[in-house]
Amino acid sequence: IECLPTPDHVPVDADPAWLSCAVQFHGHLGPWATAGLRAGMTARQAAEANGYFDVRVTVEGPFVKPPQSCFLDGLQVSTGATLGKRNLKWIKADKVVVRLENTKTGKQVEVRPTPELMSLLTSFKPKPMPKTTQSTDDHQVGEVQEHLLENIARRIAKMPGEKILRVRILAN
């Protein structure tokens, strides 16, 4: 759609269709945004909510700055809860916890990442860009790093939910 910004992303055939929706919102394919997507989709399904207007989401986590804060973008896309509608609230904390309430039924769920997911999210350590006058070198390093990030994100997107997330029903 020409009125929307163009994300920095080239989809591959194996990508789930929902991944492109998130990339359109977020701007690129990254692990933290993908983890937020998966957590939000899992929470919304567990609470049997449609999203947008029948959800209230509270998320705790270390989302002060990117890349960790990208989790919030994935959560917004997958639940429809947004900061603007005031049905998404972020609380600064050390551990990631998503709580979603279906406001029509009162059903509440909690979703937490597994150690395996947290290990994947923290596995990428960006290398400093070389300080050279050759911008092609900088560009190549950036492309390699982006490719590594996309590989981690695609892995998170395809993993079985029970390997990366723990769901607990809080109220029925």
Image (cartoon, rainbow, N blue to C red):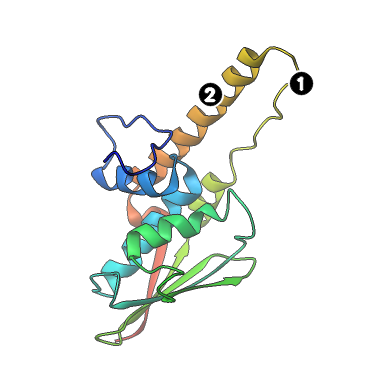
Q: Secondary structure at mark 2?
A: helix
Please name the amino acid that badge 2 sits on: Glu
Q: Quadrant of the N terminus?
A: top left
Q: Secondary structure at mark 1?
A: loop
Mark 2: few/some/many CA within 10 Å (<14, 14-19, 20+): few
Which numbered disc covers residue 143? Answer: 2
Locate residue 8: give its quadrant: top left
Q: Quadrant of the C terminus?
A: bottom left
Q: What is the distance, in whole Å, between disc 2 and disc 1 at their CAs?
A: 16 Å
Residue under circle 1?
131
Which numbered disc covers residue 72? Answer: none
The vertical placement of 103 against 163, above or below, is below
Mark 2 or mark 1: which comes first in sequence?
Answer: 1
The vertical placement of 42 against 158, above or below, is below
Q: Nearer the viewer, residue 1 or 128?
A: 1
Measuring 34% from the left and 65% from the top, which residue is drawn there?
79
Residue 107 screen position, x and y as percent: 30, 83
> For this view, does 87 lie left or right of residue 51?
right
Residue 130 screen position, x and y as percent: 73, 21
Measuring 32% from the left and 50% from the top, which residue is drawn there?
160
Residue 26 screen position, x and y as percent: 44, 48
Q: Nearer the viewer, residue 108 or 113?
A: 108
Measuring 28% from the left and 69% from the top, which residue is drawn there?
51
Residue 39 screen position, x and y as percent: 40, 61
> For this view, does 19 lie left or right of residue 93?
left
The vertical placement of 75 against 155, above or below, is below
